[in-house]
Amino acid sequence: MSIIIKFFVAPSHEAAAAVVDGGPDRAFESLEYGNFDAEEALIEWESIFTGRSFEELVGADEPEAVADPADWEGPMVFAASEALRDALAAADHSRLAEVSRLWIQKRAADGEVFDQEIATRILTDLARLARGIDGREHRLYCWMA
């Protein structure tokens, strides 16, 4: 579980990886959340949006680690897939609410409880970030500490 989670948009993996130690705040606009497994959430959200299985996405190394410590202790940066970015950008409010509801159900099966309003807000905020990319060669990233 990640204590601090920040989603941000960067022009390249190198630019995103450069903020691994201190976080993206000084370099990029970011959205901050906490207390959920963001790596797993990225996989589950993509699975819900695209219909690809969790196992298939893990097998495809999604989300892509662009900066991680050798011992998996400390801050990390992951790149959300282009498929997830595009799905978020294309989703309307009802689709985002539906995906958040399905995600909450998945988490509940593992004994985790999430508020529907908060889950929908997270996806709505991410959709706003994804829409802001709009054709640029930028990607959506997740920094976790």
Image (spheres, grey):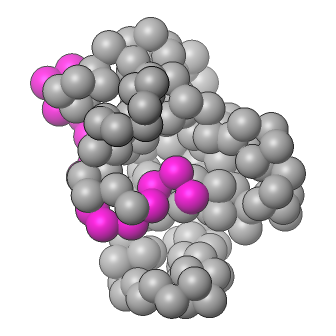
Q: Which residues are magenta?
A: 25-40
Give the left or right position of residue 46, taking residue 69 as reference: right
The answer to whether residue 53 of the structure is visible from this angle is yes
Residue 63 drawn at (x, y percent): 62, 40
How far across and how far down the image is residue 24, in percent? 24, 29
Query: Quarter holding the N terminus?
Result: bottom left
Is residue 90 shown left or right of residue 65?
Answer: right
Q: Is residue 64 above or below residue 34?
A: above
19 is within the stretch colored magenta: no
Depth order, front residue of 72/93: 72
Q: Quadrant of residue 61?
A: top right
Numbered label tally: 0
The image shows residue 21, relative to residue 30, as above or below, that is above
Identify the residue shown where x is 28% and y is 44%.
Answer: 145
Residue displayed at 38% across by 12% down: 15
| Nearer-the-camera pick, 54 or 8 | 54
Q: Residue 40: where, in percent of width, then height? A: 57, 58
| Residue 124 horizontal side relative to residue 98, left or right | left
| Residue at the left extreme of this rendering | 26
Q: Picture quarter containing residue 144?
A: top left
The answer to which of 95 and 10 lies nearer the viewer is 10
Q: Nearer the viewer, residue 33 or 96?
A: 33
Q: Horizontal and vertical percent for residue 69?
A: 40, 26
Can the viewer see residue 10 in this picture? Answer: no
- For the view shown, which residue lies furthest in the top direction? 14
